[in-house]
Amino acid sequence: MSYSYQSIPEISVEELALKLADQDSSLQLIDVREKHEAEIAFIEGFNLLPLSQFSEWSEQALVHFNPEAETLVMCHHGMRSAQMCQWLIQNGFTNVKNVAGGIDIYSCLIDSSIPRY
């Protein structure tokens, strides 16, 4: 999956923490890290869709997720999630945001109980 990068909207980890606290059921949370990464550090509520397995889940993702709902995408530092955001936008998703800094910054600034790796 390779795309030319346009400006992708971002959400800070502080904003993510507030949204998670609200427990908004319409919020769609996608984590594109690998399974072994999620076994080390994970935020409850995120759907794990490893980018390396894109061909296995990409068709289902377009059916499973609402293209108009707010969709937040996270990875370790924000690069893989930016690729996923780009793909979602190109496939008609209208409210996609990349979690700036990924789970690493979330662990540093929000929840130090989440291991860093």
Image (cartoon, helix red, strand yellow):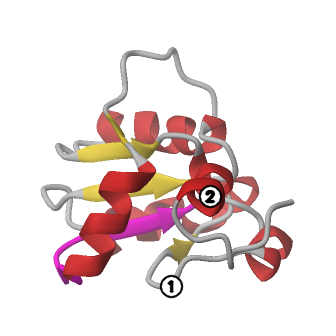
Residue at point 44%, 71% (across, down) = 60
State which region is magenta: 23-31
Query: On the image, which quarter does residue 62 sit in?
Result: bottom left
26 shown above or below 58: below
Query: Between marks 2 and 1, how big is the CA–CA gap?
Result: 12 Å
Tell me the amino acid under the disc marked 1.
Glu
Q: Position of residue 23 (x, y in %)?
A: 23, 83
Mark 2, residue position: 103
| 99 relative position to 114: left or right | left
Q: Secondary structure at mark 2?
A: helix
The residue lying at 57 percent from left, 71 percent from top is 111
Residue drawn at point x = 62 percent, y = 27 percent: 2
* Residue under pointer 1: 44
Q: Is residue 64 magenta?
A: no
Residue 65 visible in image: no
- The answer to whether residue 33 is visible is yes
Q: Amino acid at mark 2?
A: Ile
